[in-house]
Image (cartoon, rainbow, N blue to C red):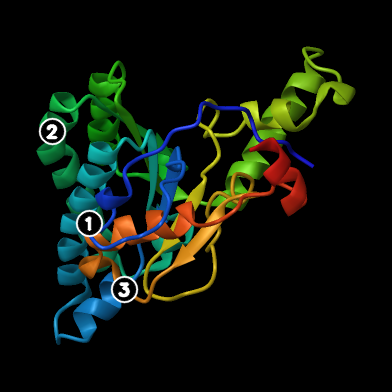
Amino acid sequence: MKSPRPRKKRSWRSDAVAPDTSTTPGDLPRHIAVIMDGNGRWAEARGLSRIQGHRRGKDSVRAVVETAREIGIEYLTLYAFSSENWQRPRREVDALMRLLKRYLRTEVGRMMRYRIRLRAIGNLRKLPPDILHELRAVEHRTRHNDRMTVQLAVSYGGREEIARAARRLARQVRDGRLRPEQIDEQRFESALMTAGVPDPDLLIRTSGEHRISNFLLWQLAYTELYVTETLWPDFRRDEFLRAIDDYRRRQRRFGKTAAQIAGEA
């Protein structure tokens, strides 16, 4: 069983979540991952095109990034486009690519102002050349920012990431740079796209679906899950803080008993 890495305890004021909360302040999640789901359903319920739902969802991205930055979240991973999403209608995929390009161009100034670093994970070679160029340019420009890291999962699949890591380690064994017995969890993690980023403490999924959709399959081993019926275009600051408050009420055990955890407090 994998043991959590030790880290400095952090807490925040409970009234930062909501004025009427009565919970005891707990540790902030260091890393939050979000499956941003429900854009299409939000639009269809209003007689709009799915593309209009995606456009509205972009406002939720800004709200969540801004809130996470304000309260001191260190890492935020957003599931923007899965490897399976390439199967969607061409018109919708093209619109999503245009939205991604516009987001990168309009938000890079804000990232620099607030010292937010952008990282991209996924099979990025599948992206259109102009999108990939824009993504790499923002990654390069923000590479020294140190207040928060936003990790954008684009053309991403968890199984594909694990297979890629296995192939990378296999090549090292073949080339004599690594012995099979040296491959442990830490070595495998170092071959993942997320190397250097701690595993998520909290996963938020919007739209009420209870599945992880091939997202961060290795990294979610001990992650706390929070599912909300709210569709992504309606997900804003209050709902984000509500998820964090729910997380802070939980006892994370990592395979230990409640008594053991209490004895360590």
Q: Secondary structure at mark 1?
A: helix
Pointer 3 or 1: first along the chain: 3
Looking at the image, which is closer to me, 32 or 157? 32
Residue identifier under label 3: 230
**Relative horizontal placement of residue 177, taking residue 13 as reference (left or right):** right
Residue identifier under label 1: 237
Across and down, in percent, residue 70 comes to 22, 38
Q: Secondary structure at mark 3?
A: loop
At horizontal 29% and vertical 63% (from top left) the residue drawn is 239
At label 1, the amino acid type is Arg
Residue identifier under label 2: 110
Q: Nearer the viewer, mark 3 or mark 1?
A: 1
Q: Label 3 neighbourhood size at 10 Å, few (<14), some (14-19), many (20+)?
A: some
Q: Nearer the viewer, mark 2 or mark 3?
A: 3
Across and down, in percent, residue 165 comes to 65, 35
**Depicted 65 relative to depicted 20: above or below:** above
Across and down, in percent, residue 29 comes to 45, 43
Across and down, in percent, residue 152 comes to 36, 42
Gap in angstroms between the C-alphas marked 3 and 1: 12 Å
